[in-house]
Image: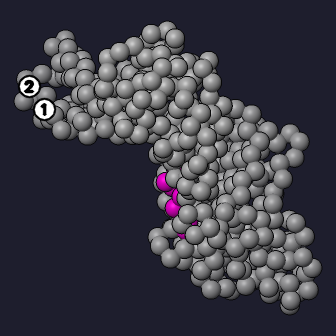
Amino acid sequence: MFRRWGFDLIACFGSALRAIGLVTLSLLLTLTAANAERRVALVLGNSQYQHAPALTNPVRDAQAVADRLEKLDFEVVSGFDLTKLQTQTTIAQFAKQVRGADIALFFYAGHGLQVSGSNYLLPVDAALEDETSLDFEAVPVEFVLRQMSRETSIRLIFLDACRDNPLAEVLAKAAGVKGARSGLAEIPIENGGAGTLVAFSTSPNQVAYDGSSEHSPFTSALLAHIGASNVSITDAMNMVTAGVFKATAGKQRPWINVSLTSEVVLHRVDLNAPLIVGEATAAQQAEDGSDGRNATANSSGDNEAQLALNVLRQKIPKLASDDPIFFDRPVDFGDPKIDGKSIAELITGKPLFTPVEGLDKSVWQGKHCNGCHEWNEVRLCEQAKNFAANDISVLRLQHPLGTRFKVALAKWAQGGCK
């Protein structure tokens, strides 16, 4: 069924430790209490409509998004298959809770429509039988946005609303309401809307798919990328767009309107933070004859953490040569795809891998690296210094020229970026 708009190696810390029989390590991911962001989300999903055919995925979509947001430290106010009264009550609870939040987020999956450019969400008891129906049965999107804009710094809106909406046709024909149509209209970000991202599951006035799998194409892609480690929300939505476009064979392209004045990262990982050892179980402590708090245990934990780091470092690929790296001289990387080329030559060439995870080949393949990344010797040296300062960071994300290129950059920086 169509759905209206609406829209490598951090994990190996745990697996490396399991492989050598150690306790699980984790990155120090959370901020101190004094600096922690306050995040509040409203998640609504409607499937079981009383006056229209039921939708397959919206409630499942909303429940999965709510679960994901809770793991990203959001206070989640949620509701599924709600009537108009229940929807208003839930929004009222959200309005009280969201005031003063650093990040306010709204996700909706279900039927939606527009009338003369204004967008409405439809509770499960909406019938839309006459011209008064919108006032008494539907929920204006603008009403929700207004509630999440009070004393909040950042607002993120995700709308996955069904386009093949029979209720819109009822309203347009039986009630004679001009301009009533399935789907949602573009939501412009007016002056003063800085700090806002609005994401629709498809472009305005285009068809979106409900999907035949567990989730809609848009929600599936959103779940795959929202909260990815050290990925900004704008980059994540680029990946979502690419994922939906690919999953629907180019028939659906999410539409995003962004006015963010700062980078928003929902899952920030400090790669320079110390690794910490997971707490030993009571059984392990009894077996060791220790309560886990003495100096010996602490020393053992430190040794295990260092060992885990060493195991991870062993995964960093080696260059084929120990010779110094120079910007404009050929490098023996140990990768036949780039061997014998200099850094200067490679950054004016073409990428071997996608610069953004999930991006369709038609978007990046054949393009030139320096055109996409604005690479030059100075900018590249700054990036290389980060790799040199934190060697395991070369494993974090796939590079358009491969991991060995990042290893070479780190060595280049260690030699003074000559």
Residue 252 vs 132, above or below: the answer is above
Left-right relation of 12 to 42: left
Magenta part of the chain: 216-225
Left-right relation of 104 to 12: right
Residue 324 vs 61, above or below: the answer is above
Find out whether residue 223 is within the magenta segment: yes
Q: Residues under labels 2 and 1: Cα distance?
A: 6 Å
* Front-most of residues 354 and 418: 418
In the picture, the disc for residue 288 is: 2
Find out whether residue 37 is within the magenta segment: no
The quarter holding residue 103 reads top right
Residue at 86%, 72% (x, y): give it: 115
Q: Secondary structure at mark 2?
A: helix
Q: Residues within 10 Å of mark 2 (few under 14, many from 20)?
A: few
Indicate the position of residue 201 as horizontal and vertical percent values. 66, 63
In the picture, the disc for residue 284 is: 1
Q: Amino acid at mark 2?
A: Asp
Which SS type dominates the magenta stretch?
Answer: helix
Indicate the position of residue 53 as horizontal and vertical percent values. 62, 86
Residue at 66%, 56% (x, y): give it: 158
Residue 276 seen anywhere in this rendered image of the structure:
no
Q: Residues within 10 Å of mark 1 (few under 14, many from 20)?
A: few
Q: Secondary structure at mark 1?
A: helix
Circles 2, 1 touching at the beta carbon (< 8 Å):
yes
Left-right relation of 311 to 50: left
Most extreme residue toward the bottom is 174
* Front-most of residues 238 and 361: 361
